[in-house]
Image (cartoon, coloured by chain):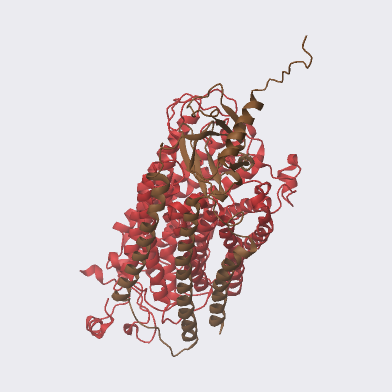
Chain colours: A brown, B red
Amino acid sequence: MAGRLWTLFFMFAAVLAVVVFWMAPDLGWWFPGDGRAHTPLGQKIDDLFYLILTITGLTFVGVQIALGYVLWRGAAAGQDPQAKSVFSHGSHTLEVIWTIVPAGILLFIALYQMDVWAHYRVKTLFPKKLEPVAEVTARQFEWRIRYPARGKKLQPTPQPDDLYTVNDLRVPAGRPVSISLRTEDVQHSFFVPELRVKQDAVPGLVIPVWFEVTDVGTYELACAELCGWGHYKMKARVKAESAADFEAWKTQAAREQFDDGYRPPADGE
Amino acid sequence: MSTLSPTLDQAGHGGHGHHAEPHPLSLLYALPSFSRDHKVIGLQFLITTLLMLMVGGLLALGVRWQLAFPWQRMPILGDWIYAAQGGQIAPEAYTMLVTMHATVMIFLVIIPILAGAFGNLLIPLQIGADDMAFPTLNMLSYWFVWPAIIAFAFALGLGPEWLTGVAGPGAGSAQGWTSYPLLSALSEAAPGSGMAQTWWLIGLTFIGFSSMMGSVNYLTTIINMRAPGMTLFRMPLTIWAMFITAILQAFALPVLTAAGFMLVFDRLPFSVHSCFFIPSGVVVNNAAATVGGGQPLLWQHLFWFYSHPAVYIMLLPAMGMVSDMLSCMSRKPIFGYKPMVYSMAAIAGLGFIVWGHHMFTSGMNPALGMTFMVSTIMIALPSAIKTFNWLGTMWGGRLQFNTVMLNCIAFVSLFVVGGLSGIFMAAVPVDIYIHDTYFIVAHFHYVLFGATLFGVFGAIHFWFPKMFGRLMNETLGKLHFLLTFIGFNCTFYPMHMLGVAGFPRRYADPYHFPYLEHLLPLNQFVTCAALLMGFAQFILLFNFFSSMFIGKRCGRNPWHANGLEWTAPSPPGHGNFDVPPVVYHGPYEYSSPLCGDKDYLPQTEYVPLPQRQAVAKAGYGH
């Protein structure tokens, strides 16, 4: 009965695989933060992820059940010296069925998601209908960020009144914002897991990236493209604030940046 | 056609006059020679790649150590290799380990073990040829692997410092196996981007030469040297897979070789000062700004134009071999032979137009993503058809649960996981999130290890008797399978979850990001499982080498299989067959009513026409 034991072994592995995936969110092995995407696009990505997870999960279960059945039956026949294998070279009908049905499902997945991608990258707000709020320049191993002065537009080249931060990207929440992504040296990738945003920074290119943060908060920014020994060190944050707070921060930041430390004496000569 | 009735006197033709049974270890004894015999070359490839498997595994364990116990002193090897760092793996060493693990596993294990080892061993035997079409080329294809191994060793930092540019394996080539410029193009970009990276590219070129010589040879042999009666649709699926793989190699590889040369030209200061991949005005590590007008994305296109078909080069031969083994161990004809062939051809054809799915977030024109997404999703279709046909093959069979069969079942079961997880990445929007996270690491390990390597383990047990006239030990074989299967799943399955949690690849220390802190225990579990899996491979090596001497003796055809290789002596002598074989059937006629009192029908066994017609009339035709 070794064959049936092995069948149970394979089926146990399959059941365990499903159970672990089912429990993963409760164990914390799931989407970062509160598990929710904090951009409308991210929520669509998550919906799509769950849709594909459902389809592939059902397929996985179906195939494993079929495998279990085939093995269980074949194990018994394998032990029986009288038994003979079914002599068949295949079935035209079955081939047609299991070509057309998966093809339909796959085409559905392919066509269904096109809209999300088109919305994100091809038609809406892209490429330059949005004024970028900042220029993000990646370098080994940090993020340098340049903002235009309050009330001004970001220029392709640095201006005297530009504001600078390092590893701290401030954006207004609640509306689509765009950044100009560049790199000073090798390739990097702008990855904000909780916003479901990822875009490589390519030497020689300036790539606009847009996203809309729905909730005020601080989100972690990481590098997702191997950029050297310190790849793991490119830790930064994206701070989404209300529009008023964002403008107030800019005023404050400008005051700090251009403060030369000179204070007139309290009692003038 | 008198050639269709072989007689003993014809065996004298072709210069292979005497066919005394060769010594059981004749292939082993011929190993340290420049042999032009395809079986010796196959065994040379097999043993070299198995050793490289252990090397690649060791590099992976280094990676796993750092991920489970970051910055802690590595036991055993740490004090020896990384004495200067207090036994720690430094970040530049970590990125080197990541790079060289992938390099060794892909270029020195998976590709050569499939095409090199099993392609060489099986192609002439299964098509009834006495050797390859170009035996000298074949010999060279093996010996070109050694310069590649030496070059990769230099890339790893093993060698004098004036040659490798780095002090020992503390740094070494660390650009990832994809070697994206500018990291790989400018020597200031990383400690390993100097001479070590040049050595890496040289190694890649040598392994490319080796593959190219192999593939030209396989194509010629399969087209020209089939035995009488071996029509294309009577070829075993292994041969079909090798044939299609060789086409992929022959057409995709030149692109990578060219790209490699372009990168070398960009790199070397004393050469032509080209700038294919280097744009102007880049300042790396405070060096002088670059002058150029190149485009780093060009490398990605060229690299993936080869390396995506290469993914199928790393999978198709295993699919073919598993089809052969499943049919034999189920004592049933393969289900849907022609759909199997066509789906392999479809995978190869579609494989050429999906490379862009590695570049969804790269900054290429976003509209292109749509095209690549559709072709990528559709490539799941032939894979699904193959899976269903494997299930159909096992359905209603008398399954023999031996080591070979268990590895094949694991192949099917794990390939399903790897195939389904691929759909997540094919979907462009979802890929935005999971690109370059551990989800992709889980995915390709399920395909390359879960499918390909389990298929290879099965194939080693299945064709070992042909190489040495002895069987491998069943108990050890099952133990190896059990431990590897458990270790494999515990290692790679949790990586799906890590990927969903946004755990990035190639991070020497991910845990200083607050959102990844809580994943440390899971990574420690994964590392323990990887250790178990690593140790299990010693069982395979022990079984492989000891069975050559003490394995149970078996005749020519221990599995009662149909293929031509089983009519040859074990091991086959020079020239392979006693008499040139003539083929009357496909290779999968198990349990046919024509078999008589046995349940298999060797391809060389003649059955008179009336009997065949009677069976065809009864509805068993194909």
Residue under the image location 47 percent in, 68 percent down = B412
Which residue is the extreme one toward the right?
A267
Q: Quadrant of the N terminus of chain B?
A: bottom left
The quadrant holding residue B594 is bottom left
Residue A173 on image: x %, y %: 55, 44
B367 relative to B453 in the view: left or right: left
The quadrant holding residue A251 is top right
Which residue is the extreme one toward the bottom?
A82
Q: Is residue B409 visible?
A: yes
The mark tally for this picture is: 0
Establish if A76 lies above or below A133: below
B329 relative to A139 in the view: left or right: left
Residue B556 on image: x %, y %: 45, 73
Residue B341 on image: x %, y %: 33, 64
Camera-nearest residue between B575 and A28:
A28
B283 relative to B208 in the view: left or right: right
Camera-nearest residue between B431 and B469:
B431
Residue under the image location 44 percent in, 35 percent down = B261
Camera-nearest residue between B367 and B145:
B367
Which residue is the extreme one toward the left?
B1
Residue B9 on image: x %, y %: 30, 69
Q: Is residue B355 visible?
A: no
Q: Quadrant of the C terminus of chain B?
A: bottom left
